[in-house]
Image (cartoon, rainbow, N blue to C red):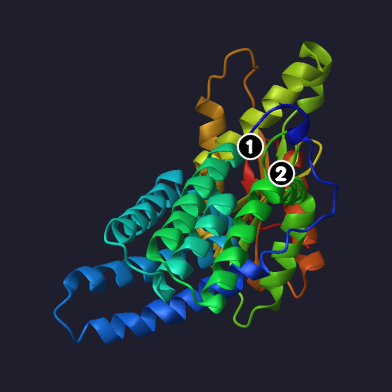
Amino acid sequence: MTSGAKDRPSPPGAVPDHRLLDLLALISVAFHTFTTLEVARGPDTGLLHANLAGLLASLLIWGANHHAALRARVPVMFVGLIGAWTLRALLLAAHLRQGLDQWMTLTVVMMALAAFTFVPYRQARWLNALVMGLYGLMYVLSGETEVALLVLVLLIMALGAYLALHGHPIQQTRVWNARLERQVRHDELTGALSRRFMDEQLAALMQEPGRRGVLLVLDLDHFKAVNDGFGHQVGDRALKAAARLMQDCLRDGDLVGRWGGEEFMILLPGQGLETGVTVAGRILERFRTARLAGIPPMTVSIGVAAVSEARSREDLVRLADRRLYAAKEAGRDRAVHACAS
C-alpha cells in the first residue's frame, strides 16, 4: 500500500460493492466454458489451453471475492501470471495486426478488476495502465472503424481510468472491513476467538441435527498472583502464551476462544466426551512442561462437557462451568468431566 494521505482508511461500516466483479467473473466462466467446448473439437490446442486457463482464473477470482480464506491464499504471483498472459495476447495481436475479439476484451476487463482486487494499489495501477495502453494501441493498429467497437473500447478505457483514480479507496475499504471482521471474530489481546464468535458457534452447533461435540472451559490457576506479583504486562504475555499453548494441542477445525479474564473456552466439533478428556489431558501436560521466558510456570483447570449432555447452549456452558469449579475445588491443575449434579 502507498503511504501518506492515500492510506487514510474508509469510514467504518462501509462495505465494498464487488457485485460488478462477481457478474463479470460469472460471465467469464460461462464464456470460457462455452469456448472451451467449442475449441476442444478442433486442432488448435493452444487456444484450448488458453480458454482452460481463463476458465480457471475466472473461477478463482469469483471464489476469492467471496471467501476471505481463499482470498488470503491467492498469491500476487497468480495475478501476475494472468497479467503476463493478457499482455502476451495483446502484444501478439498487435504484432499480427489482428482485430479485437470478445475473448480478449473480456480478458482485459477481468485483468483490470482482478488487479485492483488482489494486488497492492501501486502495482495494480501500473499493471492496469500497461494493459489498457496496449489495448488502446491494438485498437488503433487494427484500423477498425465500427462505431459499436469504438464505444466498447472507450467504455473499457473509462473503466481503467476509474479504477486508477478510485481503486485505492476501494482497496482500503476492503482492508478496513477485514480488520473489522477480525476484531469481531478475535480477542484483541490473545488472538484467540472472541466470546461473541464462540457463542455463535455454540448456538449453531446446538441447532444441528444429530449434534456432536465437546466443550472445554479452562481457567488459569492463581492468575491474580501473576498480575499482582509480576505486573499486568507479564500477565498479558501469560494470557497470549496460554492461548498459544492451547492451540498447540488441537487439530484443524477445533476452536479456541477467550471467554473473559483468564478464562478460555475450547470447542471440539464432531467429537465425543472421551476425546474431550484426552485433549484436556494433553493441555494439562503441555502447561506443566512449558518453559516460557519471562513468564512464571502456569497450570490450568478444565471442565469438560459433551454436547449430548445438554439441551441448550446455556445448559452446556453451565455444565462445563460447574465441572471447572469442581476441578478448582479438587486442587486445580486437573480436568473434570463428571461431577455430582
Examine the rendering and report whether any part of residue 239 can be seen: yes
Examine the rendering and report whether any part of residue 250 can be seen: no
Residue extending furthest left?
Answer: 43
Q: Which mark is residue 118?
A: none
Does label 2 or label 1 sit earlier along the sequence? 1
Q: Residues within 10 Å of mark 2 (few under 14, many from 20)?
A: many
- The answer to which image quadrant residue 20 occupies is bottom right
Q: Residue at x 17, y 72 (%)?
A: 45
Residue beneath disc 2: 264
- The answer to which image quadrant residue 333 occupies is top right
Q: In the image, is residue 313 above or below residue 277? A: below
Say left or right for 93 vs 28.
Answer: left
Say if mark 2 contacts mark 1, CB within 8 Å.
yes
Residue beneath disc 1: 243
Q: In the image, is residue 34 above or below residue 99? A: below
Residue toward you, 114 or 259: 114
Residue 226 on image: x %, y %: 76, 19
Residue toward you, 291 or 200: 200
Q: Residue at x 58, y 53 (%)?
A: 117
Residue toward you, 106 or 155: 155
Type of amino acid under label 1: Ala
Residue 189 on image: x %, y %: 74, 33
Residue 322 on image: x %, y %: 78, 54
Q: Secondary structure at mark 1?
A: helix
Could you give the CA–CA distance between mark 2 and mark 1, rounded to whole angstroms?
8 Å
